[in-house]
Amino acid sequence: MAKKFYLTTPLYYVNASPHIGHSYTTIAADCLARYMRPRIGKENVWLLTGTDEHGQKIQRAAEKEGLGAQEFADKTVVRFKSLWQELDISYDDFIRTTEPRHTNTVEKVLDILHEKGDIYEAKYQGWYCVPCETFWTDSQVSEKKCPDCLRPLEKISEANYFFKLSKYQDRLIRHIKANPDFIKPVIRYNEVLSFLELNKLTDLCISRPKERLEWGIELPFSPGHVTYVWFDALINYISAVGEFDNQGNYHSKWWPADLHLIGKDILRQHAIYWPIMLFALDIEPPKTIFAHGWWLINESKMSKSTGNVVSPLEISKKFGVETYRYFLLRDVAFGQDGNFSEEAIIKRFNSDLANDLGNLIYRTLTMAEKYFQGNIPAAKQTLETPQAKNIEEKIKSLDARVFDALGAESAVNFSQALEAIWELINIANKFIEDTKPWNLAKEKKTEELGDFILLLINTIKEVSGQLLPFMPKTAEAIKAQIRGDKVKKGKPLFPRIDIQNSNL
Ligand code: MSP
């Protein structure tokens, strides 16, 4: 296992309210950080998240509210911070791109690359999409619409600064080929590699003239320009955890990042621009960039204009934070798209949480209270059946199975880990049904009954330990019911949702 683990989420734009998509990446990152901390030491894990606060989108949103851009960002950043608190996100650092530690580093990067000749001045003419903050060439555009978001484009012509992406294209191709884990999952790896092999990269325009956009980091060598928001924002991954010395060498105890978690929508910036920026700076690229899929609503994209944006706060209020976290990480294999609906959450809740997990705990603790006055029975080694042996083995091997899914080199497979945990829960429930413990009680087979309950309690202990990164509060609540050599049953953790009688 890695000695240190530095992982990041994207920096979210502060102009829009956080939605389930933002919370997805952040919950996934939180789960991995929680998984790694007890395994390699809390002090060796660093989870970075934050907000992207410059650029046209934010400037326009601020103007609309009649606020200054900084004032607007100060107000809206709170929505992210309080959501992460609500969702139990254990980040180690939260960076805002308007903080001096970031802006200073961006200026430094600009200076280094300008001096080196990797940033140069030229005239730009072409199409520009304001919401995406992206330039497009004539050949990429039809009907004056943005190829990505289909919104109308603006024609612009201006003097700007460019970053030499083209110079490092071959090096990037070689790096990707030599590092099969650099971009994950494999579908994204292939996508980026074939794009690079089939297209010649054009240099990236990294400035915006102030007349058009004021809200950004000024170029140190051209006060009439601010930095393109993507060039600015990507640098956060190094500005948060290290510094450049006077010779332009970067120092950090955390870098290279072990994992950049992103959505597939921002793969190009992370898998092409970012490593090339690092090459140019003589800094090692991140180890892995993992691009997950999209949550869709009725198979279509969430957007403000269609009014189908789902609020994570609302959903977690309705179903509970733990259920929400569980659902997102369980329902779809990480990397694939998923369809989000309340029906799907209720289904998962009733079957996996109420029926499987909740029942196992409730029944086991009820029996321990009823037959052993809440004491955990001492082992008498009476269970020799293949079914009991199988459960014992599964308890022992669960840690390794979860490790294969989450801890092994660049594995990021939450649903696989949860499936392994549920396999154990389900065979334990089947064991209860097959054993019919009430008969053991009637026949006064106390020793067998004790061993049977002990095995179930050991199952629950192992399950709750493994659930901790996914559902921290649930794991705690389970632990509170099994303390030392006693159990104390609480209320059912997941009372079934009655669809007929609920107003959902
Ligand atoms: N500010 C840039 C990222 C800069 S990183 C240096 C940005 N911000 S964003 O607010 O638009 O957030 C984008 C991220 O939110 C996606 O990459 C993804 O992680 C998440 N999601 C946004 N919508 C999503 C879905 N519908 N489904 C899943 N996740 C998506 O881009």
Image (cartoon, rainbow, N blue to C red):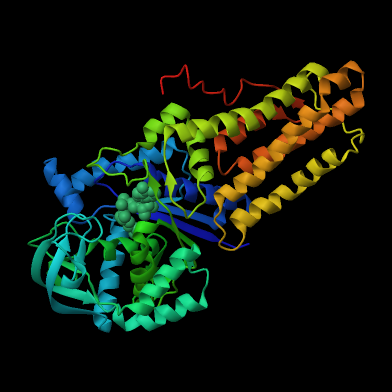
In this rendering, would 492 be left or right of 452? left
Residue 67: tell me if it is visible.
yes
x and y, in percent, of residue 243 in the image: 38, 67
Residue occupying the point 59% across, 28% down: 354
In this rendering, would 50 be left or right of 463? left
Q: How many marks?
A: 0
x and y, in percent, of residue 345 in the image: 48, 34
Q: On the image, which quarter does residue 423 sit in?
A: top right
Compared to residue 49, the image places residue 241 above or below, namely below
Residue 250: tell me if it is visible.
no
Image quarter in which the C terminus is found: top left
Q: Nearer the viewer, residue 319 or 221?
A: 319
In this rendering, would 413 be left or right of 397? left
Image quarter in which the N terminus is found: bottom right
Q: Nearer the viewer, residue 86 or 299?
A: 299
Compared to residue 96, the image places residue 319 above or below, namely above
x and y, in percent, of residue 486 in the image: 76, 25
x and y, in percent, of residue 165 in the image: 30, 77
In this rendering, would 63 be left or right of 425? left
Compared to residue 323, the image places residue 226 above or below, namely below
Residue occupying the point 80% across, 29% down: 434
Residue occupying the point 38% across, 42% down: 20
Q: Nearer the viewer, residue 401 or 248?
A: 401
Q: Nearer the viewer, residue 322 or 120?
A: 322
